[in-house]
Amino acid sequence: MDRILLGHGSGGKLMHELIKTHFSPAFGIEGAGDSAFVDVPQGRLAYTTDSYVVTPLFFPGGNIGELAVNGTVNDLAVAGADPLYLTCGFIIEEGFLLSDLQKIIASMSAAAGKAGVKIVAGDTKVVNKGKADGIFINTSGIGVLQNNRSIAAAKIKAGDAVIVSGELGSHGVSVLAERNGLTFDPPVVSDTRALNGLVSAMYGASPDIHFMRDPTRGGLATTLKEAALESGLCIRIRDQSLPVPPGVKGACSLLGLDPLFVANEGILIAILEHAAAAAVVKAMKGHEHGKHAAIIGEIADAPAGMVLLETAVGGSRIIDMLQGEQLPRIC
Amino acid sequence: MDRILLGHGSGGKLMHELIKTHFSPAFGIEGAGDSAFVDVPQGRLAYTTDSYVVTPLFFPGGNIGELAVNGTVNDLAVAGADPLYLTCGFIIEEGFLLSDLQKIIASMSAAAGKAGVKIVAGDTKVVNKGKADGIFINTSGIGVLQNNRSIAAAKIKAGDAVIVSGELGSHGVSVLAERNGLTFDPPVVSDTRALNGLVSAMYGASPDIHFMRDPTRGGLATTLKEAALESGLCIRIRDQSLPVPPGVKGACSLLGLDPLFVANEGILIAILEHAAAAAVVKAMKGHEHGKHAAIIGEIADAPAGMVLLETAVGGSRIIDMLQGEQLPRIC
């Protein structure tokens, strides 16, 4: 049997075999109960969920499986939490290749290992051919907030520095390229990766980070606009400080895209006291996922809720959230 | 705008409006961060996930939304945990009616309120028309295990009693009927409901329940077979003790289905000391969701891993897990 059948989602014999042969060994899950039992250290928990519907399922630099692990790990990490446990829910289209499922599961297992989290519970549903698009994966995750850490837009203050941890646009461009059969020179590879190690390094340099978020769907622009609206302050960033790699720059100019709105998977923004920013950036540059970290702007009191981009020639452009959709099903 | 657009899943402006207008008020979620911050009482946690792909989305007695809440609440409850928090991930097909989404959200909110759990985080993805089937919903949930409760197949012992909390087959038959435009007299209505209150009543009668599970996909037969295999013991049940309501009996005989394999949503099985069984059944009968609770069989040492059904005429039938699939996309 080399393809997924409806019976694999029936709850019966085929599903038990699928779990026993493929999921349980990869994730180290024992038993067939629906709930996992987990011990968590004392402290508030961060709790999150994300579904992944990226198309194509395999793209330069990754696939839907590692994206589903890394994305949820990152949602916890930018909340200031140490990610501990994940669950995964698979919705699979009848006829899906078992060999592709195996690749995806292996990637998830490897990504979880790299991030130091454990996949503790899962669920598999199969829908009729034509009623899904290969596979959709939901992951949820819990993490613990150590040392009374808290991340909140309300903590952002005028004068704070805005840091971005790495280069913009690689994930979005890599998926778009794969979807359309384009190749770029230099090639653009997704930046999907877990950022919890980078966040630990940042907290090592400064215990009080006011705000973090990963600029995924909607890109950097949308995330900054969220921060401006939620804090009621103004974010001013400098065009020249934005780390856009040559491949992304070239692809975006060819395709008429703005790198500010292209989805990322392996970077975060952080907002914190200006006095601590240099030390935090230095710590980030010492981490493999923070080599391109940079201070890209500052927080101002007014105009409230606005994001302003200062251009090289001294002009200033108002940045809003993504309108409509630029690249659907990017994650 | 009365339909869901791709842009509602973009992470940008439309998605923020959808969340702000529909999801946040219904679930009482504040802020736009991806993670919720939750406090949990001390104790081990139970952690689970399930995706819901039922078709049709609306059926007699419920819809996919309340199913998604109740199903995950029940997975925690039968693990012996008090359900606390849920997350929900929506995968919506482009063109889905906003009014249907509103109905589903309202049902989820009501079901969460009834079960006493809080939906704390969510995610929305939109896929192109024809790439999903209306809406799929994933819920994950966490609950706390009070009083060192533990539920495990390893705790099942020969001589234990097997209890079922209510009537068999209503969910599966109601979905099947709706899907095929059939009506039965008496009508069959899904039994989707949260069982955590019933489980509390059971623990009130006996602190040591060895095993519980909700016989959803694959029906009672599959769940009993799981328990037999996981415990390495034999489960003997009596056909005459099984509570099959007249509507389900009629529909199953008409359609050639076996109620033992039909999916349920609002019942559980429990296995515990025989001496405590009568008191537990009495407590269950005093609860609105346990009126049809009954002792349906006992645990024996051998034949190991087997489920045997004693028929009215004194015969005995070997019960296995569901083979293939009987009713796909039942939950």
Image: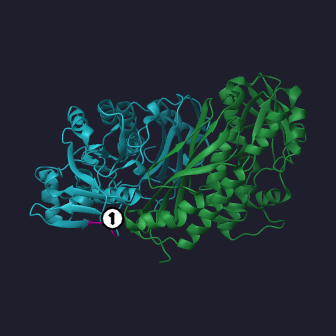
Chain colours: A cyan, B green
Instruction: Write down the quadrant of residue B312 in the picture.
Output: top right
Foreground residue among A301 and A116 = A301
Residue B155 position within the rendered picture, expressed as x and y whole percent measured from the top left = 72, 24
Q: Chain of mark 1?
A: A
| Residue B262 in sight from this viewpoint | no
Instruction: Write down the quadrant of residue B255 in the picture.
Output: bottom right
The reply, left or right, for residue B193 in relation to residue A288 is right
Q: Residue at x 90, y 39 (%)?
A: B282
Q: Name the secondary structure under disc 1.
A: loop
The reply, left or right, for residue A215 in relation to residue B128 is left
Q: Amino acid at mark 1?
A: Met
Q: Is residue B306 above or below residue A311?
A: above
Which SS type dominates the magenta stretch?
loop
Q: How many C-alpha atoms fall within 10 Å of the one at disc 1: few (<14), some, or many (≥20)?
A: many
Task: For the C terminus of chain B, give its image quadrant.
Answer: bottom right
The reply, left or right, for residue B142 in relation to residue B247 is left
Foreground residue among A264 and B151 = A264
Q: Is residue B115 above or below residue A120?
A: below
**Residue position marked by numbered label 1 in the rendering:** A321
Residue B104 position within the rendered picture, expressed as x and y whole percent measured from the top left = 60, 64
Q: Residue furthest bottom?
A: B1
Which residues fall within the magenta stretch?
A: A319-323
